[in-house]
Amino acid sequence: MKRFGLILSMVLFATAIFAQQRHLVLWDNETAPHSNGLSGEEWEQSRGAWRNTTRTDMWIFEANPERKNGMAIVYFPGGGYYTVGTGFSVGKRFADAGYTVACVRYRLPNGHREIPLEDAEEALRVMRSMADEMGFDSSLVGVMGTSAGGYLAASLSVLSLSKPSFSILVYPVISSEKGIRHDGTIINLLGERDADDPAVAGQFSLDKRVDESTPPAILIHCDDDKLVPPVNSTLYYNALKHYGIESSLHIFPSGGHGWSGRSDFEYYHEWFAAVDNWLRRFADKKRR
């Protein structure tokens, strides 16, 4: 398999709110196993929301040394597979709490369904390979995703042979079933024709792909989310419990969608505390 030589550089943000980080380019359309068929310049549609992505970037925020807990998170931001964010505010928050965090700007699928999962698998592989260098436990490397990024994190958890240690799924797209799914995410992944074919699209309902090998997960959603209905989270949670897999589900009464990086979200402290506490309990059990 062709591999892109990792380009590693230190990046220091001009704004003081972001910590020093490492920037890795994993590969691009010329060097990855498959191309998404896009070409030309990548461009920022709005702040932090990128279109036409043709390469896979990973920014690693080092854990706060005073709180370092030996865990690592590979984070996939959302955007409906139409845009993809960088996720820096969420990554920085978890890094401040003691986690080593990689924020991944993956290639958009453009109807090439293998592309996001291919990028996610490589990001997880590279992150685990850096465990000794960066001082975290390679057996405690999980994934986090928001919205379409939640679909990608869950895909890695159920479709890949190389699974993460845990999953954090925040208002995730899970189902490909009409009336439940987020149409844009599934159409951009599969193409309009296959997204409308139940025989094809049905294979991409991730709750139906859960089995005994699926890693533990915590799911966070809001009851009034109109963009990605909370039933996406409950379907995945119920599938995990069917197989007796450790999991936790938190549905807040209000907040809508897209609040993960917003400090004005009513449950800003609560959702983060729920994830942090669950992860620490998970790590304690793993280390026994």
Image: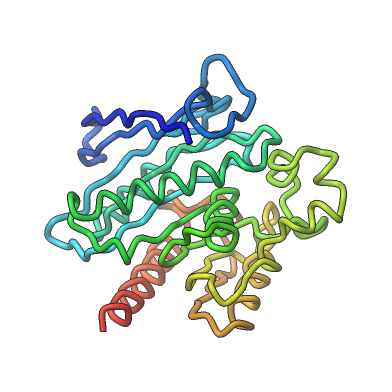
Name the side, left or right, on which 138 lies relative to 205. Answer: left
Q: Could you say where residue 195 lies in the image, as x and y percent from the top left?
A: 80, 46
Q: Answer left or right for 160 relative to 279.
A: right
Q: Residue at x 36, y 76 (%)?
A: 282
Question: Can you name the residue that lies furthest to the top here?
Answer: 40
Is 196 placed above or below 180 here?
above
The structure residue drawn at horizontal position 31% and vertical position 56%, both measured from the top left corner, is 94
Q: Quadrant of the C terminus?
A: bottom left
Q: Is residue 126 above or below residue 70?
A: above
Q: Quadrant of residue 52?
A: top right
Q: How many marks?
A: 0
Q: Nearer the viewer, residue 76 or 8?
A: 8
What residue do we see at 63% from left, 36% from top?
109
Q: Nearer the viewer, residue 7 or 84?
A: 7
Residue 187, by quadrant, is top right
Residue 180, position in %: x, y? 76, 60
Give x and y (percent) for residue 61: 27, 45
Q: Nearer the viewer, residue 34 or 93?
A: 34
Q: Residue 160 at what x, y percent from top left?
A: 55, 57
**Left or right: 63 with respect to 44?**
left
x 72%, y 60%: residue: 205
Q: Residue furthest front?
A: 1
Coloration of the structure image: rainbow
Q: Is residue 62 above or below residue 247?
A: above
